Amino acid sequence: MDEKKPFMSESAIGIEPATAVDAVDGILERAARLNASDVHIDPRADDILVRFRIDGEVEQAGVLPRRLHEEMIARLKIMSGARTDIHAVPQDGRFMAELCGRPYNVRISFMPTYRGENFVARLLPAQAAESLSFAALGFTPDHAAKMSSAALATNGLILVTGPTGSGKTTTLRVFLGLKSSMPLSVMTLEDPVEYEVPGVRQVHISQSHGVSFASGLRAAVRQDPDVIMVGEIRDEETARTAVHTALTGHLVLSTLHTVSALEAILRLSDMGVERYLMAATLRLIVGQRLVRRICDKCAGDAGRADRCEVCRGTGYSGRSVIAEVCEVDHMMRGLIAGGASQSVLREHALSNGFRTMSEDAGEKVDWGVTTAEEAVKALYS
């Protein structure tokens, strides 16, 4: 799209919105209508660039007059509870909004730039946790069965791994939904809290106030929980605390940034967690990525995609997970405790029905869920 094209003439904003209120409301409505996950507003010398992230891809949506910038920032700060008198340091905020007839949690991040404050809004549909399932996210029936079985555990450690933006938090939300429907005490430690889950005590971790994942986890244990979700294991202290918590009769759910599921064992070891403690606590490790789904309406047909109102000519609509799910059985626990290499662990897992992420991606290509190009991009880029 031409960067100087007037902003989204077919939207409720109009070619040139008269006020900042019109601009903000119109952008959010349009983003929700297109199922965008994020809205980027970037001030430039003469205008404001607007972009949406849709199905993981950033797309330019148009431009707005520069004169609206300061009023838009003020409007969003008031809506999200951020301070309107601070412009030189980053700020975060959030608010609830009804967009296209549906409730959304909108999370805002303000960042000072050379041309003025930029902001990014993340749009999170305010769905009940029970409305999501492993199958709905794209997990195959065998993977979903293993994950649902692991969710019944009363203690131990369940890890979801993958890079930033691979859907780990959403997968954990399904685990939480399963646990929150049981007569249990469930807590989360998150930075930030993205999804609200009924019946779950959710804690926002604030490093600026001296609350880290490790210190928050130690405090949470004193709140008599059965299940604790730790948003991310980032350092040695959090890793050790999470493992010891799992060892003392709690079920701990968390995420790690690793390339594969089995690499989580090496990462925990690098963080100083003893192998025998890993062997005693690990229950399940999920590795995942996200791929764009082929549009159901035009079936990704290049000859029709340019006329498809669902995928806007991209050939894709929505996303699906590609995954590998490793159950930690008795024999694998012995291998972990004995210091077995990743290749030995992998060989054992494969002999027990473990399917790699590339195999799962290949199946989804064969089933027409996604394309080979998308699978390769997710696995190797």
Image: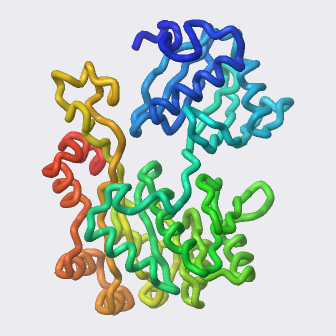
x, y (%) of residue 37?
A: 50, 39
- The quadrant of the picture occupied by the C terminus is top left
Q: Position of residue 210 (x, y in %)?
A: 78, 62
Q: Residue at x 55, y 63 (%)?
A: 232
Instruction: Tally the marks.
Output: 0
Examine the rendered structure and indicate whether residue 91 appears above or below residue 128.
Answer: above
| Looking at the image, residue 64 lies above or below residue 366 | above
Position of 354 with respect to 309 (left or right) is left
Whether residue 240 is visible here, answered yes or no, is no
Which quarter of the figure has residue 265? bottom left
Q: Picture quarter containing residue 250?
A: bottom right
Q: In terms of depth relative to the viewer, which is nearer, 172 or 374?
A: 172
State the residue lying farthest toward the front: 101
| Residue at the image point whose x is 70% and y is 59% from the top | 204
Residue at 47% in and 7% down: 5
Q: Residue at x 63, y 67 (%)?
A: 188
Q: Is residue 310 left or right of residue 164?
A: left
**Whole-percent x, y for residue 286 in the image:** 37, 68
Q: Is residue 25 left or right of residue 371?
A: right
Q: In this orientation, does residue 157 appear?
A: yes
Which residue is nearer to you in this view: 94 or 219?
Answer: 94
Name the image quarter holding the N terminus: top left
Residue in the foreground of this view, choosing between 258 and 47: 47
Is the image coloured rainbow, by chain, by secondary structure, or in one colour? rainbow
- Indicate left or right for 323 with 183 as reference: left
Relative to 37, say whether 2 is above or below. above
Residue 236 placed where, x, y %?
58, 72
- Residue at the right extreme? 85
